[in-house]
Amino acid sequence: MKRGKAFVSTFLFALFSYLLLTIAAGQSMAQEAPWSHIIWSFEELIIGISVSLIVAALADHILCRTENFRMLNPVRWLIMLIYTIPLFIEMVKANFDVAYRVITGKIEPGIVKIDPDLETDLGITILANSITLTPGTLTVDVDDERSEMYIHWIKVGEDPTENIAGRFVRWIRRFAE
């Protein structure tokens, strides 16, 4: 039974991701039918289903390692979608901060260790990617046993865990823990 749930959930995740990435593909047909930019062509759906079946067959044991299917909860998906707003805001603020530091030369780079106190691999992975996406920081290494992360920071300051990952961790706990 676990194998079936893992296969179906991986298939649905892959199909959703594929359809999300190809949502604009139907716009080229907008002259023929005004609603074609909303739906996908038949060929796109067939390709998406085929690719998703292959991905599910090859990767369901990787994406679903435990019997905990909490990420199938649509509320978690909604929270994860909402998380993109504070992530974008932090990215914009960091862009201005990095530009200021480059112009003024107030750069004191270094590698700091943070302990975000996240328990799931998904949460740690999303946090590491969020930190790396934010200008001025780069996730260098993750200690799997203790969930500690080593971050290259453009301006080493006080309380690196709160300054680098504080807002991210609070959001990530809502959907990944």
Image (spheres, rainbow, N blue to C red):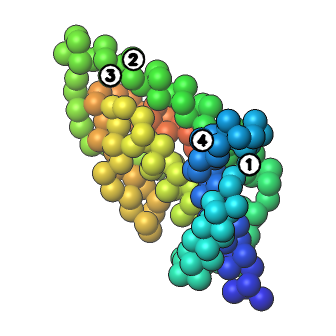
Q: Whole-percent x and y of residue 102?
A: 23, 18
Quadrant for the N terminus, please.
bottom right
Q: Secondary structure at mark 2?
A: helix
Regarding mark 4 in the picture, which secondary structure is present there?
helix
- Look at discs 1 and 4 and give the one toward the viewer: 4
* Circle 1: residue type: Ile
Q: Which residue is mark 1?
A: 39
Q: Specify which label sits upstream in the sequence, 2 or 4.
A: 4
Q: Residue at x 31, y 51 (%)?
A: 140
- Name, please, the residue furthest toward the top: 104
Query: Which is nearer the eye, 74 or 116?
Result: 74
- Asked if the residue at tag 3 contacts the one at tag 2, i.e. Cβ–Cβ closer than 8 Å, the answer is yes
Q: Which residue is mark 3?
A: 98
Question: Which residue is identified by label 2?
Answer: 96
The residues bearing labels 3 and 4 have C-alpha atoms spaced at a distance of: 39 Å
Image coordinates for residue 81, horizontal then vertical, percent: 68, 42
